[in-house]
Amino acid sequence: MKQPASRDAILARVRAGLRHDPAQAAAQRQAALAYLAARQQGPRPVFDGDLLQRFRTRSEAMSSTVDCVASRAEVPFAVARYLAAGGLPLRAACWAEYAALDWAAAGLAIEPRAARDDDLVGITGAFCAVAETGTLMLLSGPQTAATTSLLPETHIAIVRASRIVAGMEDGFDLVRSERGELPRAINFVSGPSRTGDIELTIVLGAHGPYRVHLLIIEQE
């Protein structure tokens, strides 16, 4: 007999301890979703101009570097140019969705897998990007390992212009409408890792990548 997953077993014990009636679970879920759908948002800033330019400006203010390409096919060559210009390794781990890109034609050795501790470059996508703050929204999952954006010294993120939203609220609305349920983890990336703990001096790469480079695909 198949044993229940640890997560399911733990949640089952929590529900039992709280004396939740399983028969009411669906109704309670619908009530929670209705509450979220009916909520009113507080005041939000109004942006002048297009979201792509706002996102680029805010990203660069957070010490990310940004490049735009016309199409998905140009991504490998843009990555190669960035790595060569910085004297960085021409090999990397990437998310599975980019495995079919012609990396070899650009002179790169890219492996579709989760990053390991010896990987210096990681290439990911982004569920969406937030123009208000220049932030990437990354959802964890079997094909979107969080390690690929967190472990390597250099994080290259591929962002589709059509997935740039105005604010965090819009990002979470997109998750609910497209995924239904939140994943195990949502990671927000706003430029390279940094800290100001020592003498209030900002140091990059304290808890993650030293560099974050964004490639924005302007056309699908």
Image: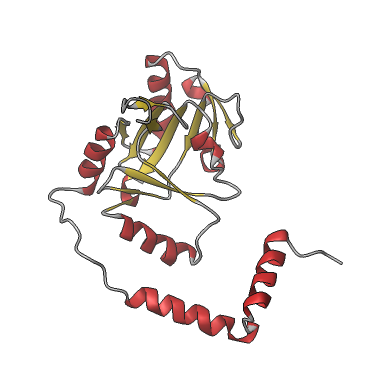
Nearest the viewer among 46 and 102 is 46
Q: Which residue is drawn at 55% across and 38% down?
A: 147
Q: Which residue is drawn at 55% across and 55% down?
A: 184
Nearest the viewer among 179 and 210 is 210
Q: Which residue lies furthest to the right in this view?
A: 1
- Answer with left or right where residue 88 lies relative to residue 14: left
Residue 158, horizontal then vertical, whole percent? 41, 38
Q: Which residue is drawn at 36% across and 57% down?
A: 171
Nearest the viewer among 162 and 115 is 115
Q: Residue furthest left?
A: 48
Q: Can residue 57 be seen in this view?
A: yes
Q: Is residue 100 visible?
A: no
- Quarter holding residue 84: top left
Q: Is residue 176 above or below residue 111?
A: below
- Give the quadrant of the N terminus: bottom right
Residue 123, horizontal then vertical, whole percent? 48, 34
- Answer with left or right where residue 93 lies relative to residue 78: right
Nearest the viewer among 159 and 207 is 207
Q: Which residue lies furthest to the front in this view?
A: 199
- Answer with left or right where residue 137 lies relative to residue 140: left
Q: Residue furthest top?
A: 87
Residue 170, horizontal then vertical, whole percent? 32, 60
- Answer with left or right where residue 177 lies relative to residue 56: right
Q: Is residue 218 above or below residue 12?
A: above
Q: Which residue is drawn at 58% across and 81% down?
A: 25
